[in-house]
Image (cartoon, rainbow, N blue to C red):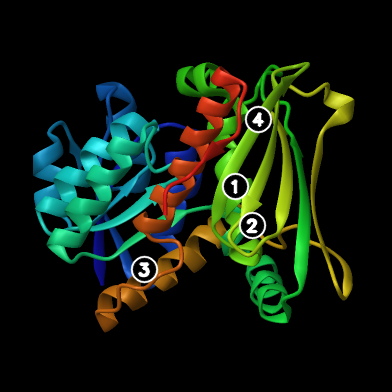
Amino acid sequence: MLRFGLFGTGHWAAETHAAALTAHPKAQLAGIWGRDHDKTEALAQRYGVPAFDDVDALIDAADAVAVALPPDIQADIAVQAAIAGKHLLLDKPLALSLPDAERVVSATARAGVASLVFFTNRFHANVAGFLTATAAAGGWYGARATMYASIFEPGNPYGASPWRRERGALWDIGPHALSIIVPVLGRVTQVAALDGPRDTVHLLLAHATGATSTLSLTLNAAPAARAFDFVFYGENGVERVPSGDGTAVQALSLALDQLVEDVDSGARNNLCDVRFGREVVAVLDAAEAARRQSRTVRLPG
């Protein structure tokens, strides 16, 4: 049984992380820490676990940490937990800067702990199966991703998030798009970017395989224009990525299966570990530079 300390008290922490950790047969929710004392107490009481007011104390009380906090706060806690020898269940994006992502990767490697960055769509069983089969088929030379979300409507639990308002779709849902495209087309080597109406960002990516892809992303689509669509083009035709066939809690449960297996086996080769999280941050960072400088940016490596 792997004891998890949960960091965060928002909607995602309460309705996804805490729910999945409580229900998982090989995980135990050891306690909760949050930046708001009252919310921490309320969520801890709801799930029948201790509320912590000290980060170190919760890290010490757990075998692993689950972080559902803004990415800049997540990075510091992840480093702290890794140094203490705790395994990591993190959210996307790994961090809001490449240096912070590098710090997490370095701390994780030095400590030898297991890590997983939760990209929701990658952990729907039918999507994961599709990506494995599609990557194995090969011959893909292009992809198109459209993610037009509309989170600023009344009642949306993510619309007031300061970091989402500041960083927009590129950093919030861009990681989801990359988590689908990169496993099939390979590592991103070049990025060009252009802004559009309603806070849309359009990316043109070159991949190490020679393929190219386009991503169109916004958090501020007109409600009637919301869309979620991924299409691959190749020598054998056209393949559309299926919609996830489960809930976010079920997806996180599958992610927990993989993390627990990595911990038990000692393996450190999870495809969605912090190294992949850093790779995604590198693409997002390059896209920011491409937008700002109106040029194509090459990624190192």
Residues packed near mark 4 inside 10 Å, few (<14), some (14 to 19) or many (20 plus): many
Q: CA distance from mark 1 to mark 3?
A: 19 Å
Looking at the image, is mark 4 or mark 3 earlier in the sequence? 4
Q: Earlier in the sequence, mark 1 or mark 3?
A: 1
Compared with 207, 128 (above or below) is below
- Tag 2: amino acid: Ile
Relative image position of residue 199 (x, y in whole percent): 69, 18
- Which image quarter is the C terminus in? bottom left
Mark 2 Cα within 10 Å, few/some/many (few <14, many 20+)? some
Q: Left or right of 122: which side holds 6?
A: left
Tags 4 and 1 touching, CB below 8 Å: no
- Mark number for residue 176? 1
Which mark lies nearer to you, 2 or 4?
Answer: 4
For the residue pair 57 and 172, the one nearer the viewer reads as 172
Kindly indicate whether the residue at mark 3 contacts the one at mark 1 (C-beta within 8 angstroms): no
Identify residue for label 2.
Answer: 180
Say left or right for 119 vs 124: left
Amino acid carrying mark 4 in the image = Ala
- The amino acid type, in three-letter code, at marker 3 is Leu
Q: Secondary structure at mark 3?
A: helix
Q: Secondary structure at mark 2?
A: helix
Q: Position of residue 97 (x, y in %)?
A: 36, 32
Could you tell me how far apart the alpha carbons at marks 4 and 3 are, in whole angstroms? 34 Å
